[in-house]
Image (spheres, rainbow, N blue to C red):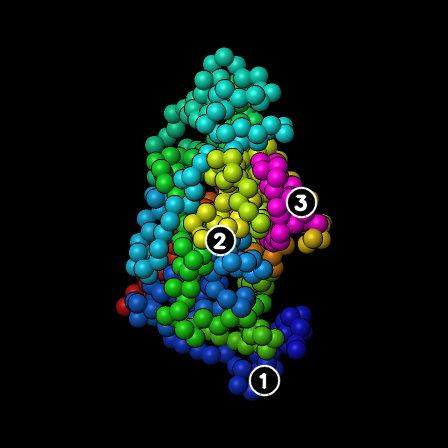
Amino acid sequence: MISRRRFLQLTAIAPSLVGPGLAAQTGHRRIVIVGAGLAGLRAAELLRKAGREVIVLEARPQSGGRVLTIRSPFDDGLYGEAGAIRFSGVHTRVLRLARERRLTLVPFESPNGSPITAIGGVRMRSDEIGLSRFALKLRSDERPLASSGLLEKYVGSLPAALSDPAAAAYGEWQPYDRLTWPDWLRSRGASAEAMQLMTLGGDSTELSALYVLRQYALLKKATRFFKIRGGMDQLPRALAQPLGDVVRYGAEVVRVDRSGNRVRVDYLEKGTPRQVEGSRLIFAIPFSTLRQIDVRPAFSPAKARIVREVSYYPATRFLLQSRTRVWQESGLNGAARTDRPAEIWDCAYDLPSSRGLLGATVGGAVGRTLLDMSADECVKFGVQVGADAFPSLPLNFEKGVAYRWAAERWSRGAFVVFRPGQMTTMMPEMGRPEGRVHFAGEHTSAWMGWMEGALESAERVAREVMEAEPG
């Protein structure tokens, strides 16, 4: 098997050296798409419907990208999500495609019982936080709002455009982009205890306040969240199946030549060097992996800086099978937010097994520390994460999986995030085409981090290509 380095050396000398039958395939109006996640698959579908020839190159052995359902090694038909776990009722593109593909939706969170909030080793039903035993010295004006109203109090009035996915008033939003989310809450007068409650469940210490506020505004009208029965990967599978052999799996792109009036792509298909040409190229992969591809000539300085510097959240997803659903015995629904920080939920409340399967996500500083652990150590850590909310979990634990997205070769992180000062400078350039090269994916959309963002970007990039090459 030829190595990636050797392949680059050979193709740099002469394309003819890749061997007989492997010379560049040419197509007058062919569109080459790199990545078979939701963005790449949906773009391919739309372009094919418009009569364009399309090839999708996917390095993984399956479609879906960061929409990844895990079924093994769990028992009784249990399954959980390593990637996307839910979508909102305001995510119209996901809802429409799910209906068209006749996929069954169920509420994301079990309606049976209450969530848990865990702080400093004390656990409390989330609907009782205002009366809590937490060692939190909330101010008198904060105490009545502890269970649900603190965010509204401190976020206050926001520009209407922040809640519009189509708006991109980044110049006007710069004041929100100057501070981290915790520092911004502090500047609004929040006490340290109130900030602790408002930042439970996820590490936001390094994130731009604008990043958090944009998501807050977009989702403010969302009242329900859903998942797909049978696994979230049912959606990318439904998109990939009609494409057939248009999608080439095990195809690792190593170089792109965009110097002429065509785009040439060199890739390794299961170790064999290949080339393909097209009139346009769509990168539907994270910038964290685009960094690994040799693009010539280089992108503009602004784009190259973003590709090089933008961050991806180092999330780890734990899926923990238990002998029984211990949380139900206490009238709980398996959902929790903790100060580790972690978000926890019941993955299998709608399945018939008497066993349980908890999902849990950690990230930020905690996510980075997990990268140095062995797989077994990581799962053991995950059990302790679950025990923060459900202390009897360790005694009932049977088996588990820890999926570390920052260590996954074709993602290098779970979703795009921005530090102070980055969002207002990077987002206007993130999805902008560079000559014959276009960009899609959640990182190019206002709905960043969501399946809706991937689908929205696919629609945008398909329009761009068709407008650039009409007819």
- For disc 3, the marked residue is 381
Of pointers 1 and 3, the one earlier in the residue sequence: 1
Q: Nearer the viewer, residue 191 or 347?
A: 347
| Residue 424 visible in the current orientation | no
Find the residue positioned furthest to the left.
471
x, y percentage for residue 207? Answer: 55, 37
Q: Main secondary structure of the magenta part?
A: helix
**Dot 3 alpha-carbon crowd within 10 angstroms: few under 14, some 14 to 19, many 20 or more:** some
Q: Secondary structure at mark 2?
A: loop
Locate the C terminus and report the quarter of the image it occupies.
bottom left
Residue 44, quarter of the rendered image: bottom left
Q: Nearer the viewer, residue 53 or 381?
A: 381
Q: Is residue 35 magenta?
A: no
| Residue 108 visible in the current orientation | yes
Q: Which numbered marker is on residue 291?
A: none
Q: Which residues are drawn in magenta?
A: 377-404
Q: Amino acid at mark 1?
A: Gly
- For disc 2, the marked residue is 353
Q: Secondary structure at mark 1?
A: loop
Identity of the residue drawn at 50% across and 66% down? 62
x, y percentage for residue 307? Answer: 55, 52
x, y percentage for residue 147? Answer: 46, 25
Residue 56, quarter of the rendered image: bottom left
- For disc 1, the marked residue is 19
Q: Is residue 401 magenta?
A: yes
Of pointers 1 and 2, the one earlier in the residue sequence: 1
